[in-house]
Image (spheres, helix red, strand yellow):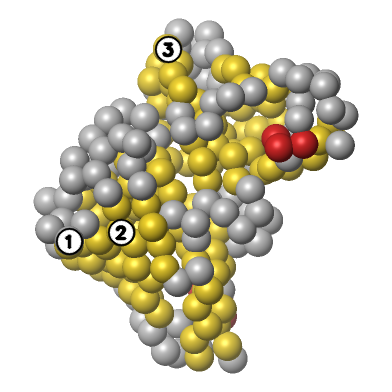
Amino acid sequence: GENVEQHPSTLSVQEGDSAVIKCTYSDSASNYFPWYKQELGKRPQLIIDIRSNVGEKKDQRIAVTLNKTAKHFSLHITETQPEDSAVYFCAAPYSGGGADGLTFGKGTHLIIQP
Amino acid sequence: NAGVTQTPKFRILKIGQSMTLQCAQDMNHNYMYWYRQDPGMGLKLIYYSVGAGITDKGEVPNGYNVSRSTTEDFPLRLELAAPSQTSVYFCASSYSPRNTEAFFGQGTRLTVV
């Protein structure tokens, strides 16, 4: 199955600054890369995703970039706000292009300092 | 729509006991999944189903069983509970396995003592 590595495990930034979280994957057949946000005690919720046929996708203050050659993708959050504080997970298909769920990174605890 | 509903929200089991975690979705999704989340870790896939009557193992299936008799329901059975099964369990569903959002239930926090 797919292997997803995520860094850093904890990221502390000043409110208003940018945050970047990076992930690498192992299976070159993987074609879908979602990012989930999980607030304390809550369920994971999708915030943005990218398919393998594009290199970048933006949604207001959030963007994701994908480098298929290097097999890594990153989440960028600009103008961070207190409500951005949460754990963020990257993911990739469990077995590359197969029909069987997701493999998740271990998560990044993002802390927004006032 | 209620989305994905899990019951119970919390449960304490004694070692060796068995239980079933319930999961139901009302979005007519064919694909359903069970994940477990250990403290400070990402989610790991236990079992998945691509439709009624079809299930398959994920990354960590040992100690668990599933069934999928209807499109809506995907229960997870724990047999002979062990302390290593202490975790938060999330059920999820999606319209397709790739390129579409997976919707998660609110989770079941299970403690085995």
Instruction: Tell me where residue B82 appears, x and y as whole percent.
Output: 76, 30
Do badges 3 and 2 share one subunit? no
Respond whether the residues carrying marks 1 and 2 are from the same subunit: yes
- How many neighbours does mark 3 have within 10 angstroms: few (below 14), some (14-19), or many (20 or more)? few
For image coordinates 31% across by 28% down, the residue present is A99
Q: Which residue is mark 3?
A: B54
Taking A88 as reference, is A113 left or right? right
In this rendering, the count of numbered labels is 3
The relative height of residue A28 versus residue B77 in the rendered view (above or below) is below
The disc label shown at residue A24, or none? 2
- Looking at the picture, tell me which residue is in the foreground, B1 or A36: A36
Q: Residue at x 37, y 76 (%)?
A: A20
Classify mark 3: helix, strand or loop: strand
Tell me if residue A10 comes above or below residue B50 in the rendering. Answer: below
Q: Residue at x 27, y 42 (%)?
A: B99
Q: CA distance from mark 1 to mark 3?
A: 35 Å
Identity, as a three-letter code, of the amino acid under mark 3 = Ile
CB within 8 Å, label 1 to label 2: yes
Query: How far apart in space, not on screen, are marks 3 and 2 (Cα)?
Result: 31 Å
Q: Chain of mark 2?
A: A
Q: Secondary structure at mark 2?
A: strand
Give the residue type that dot 2 points to: Thr
Res A95 seen here: yes
Q: Position of residue B32 (x, y in %)?
A: 46, 27
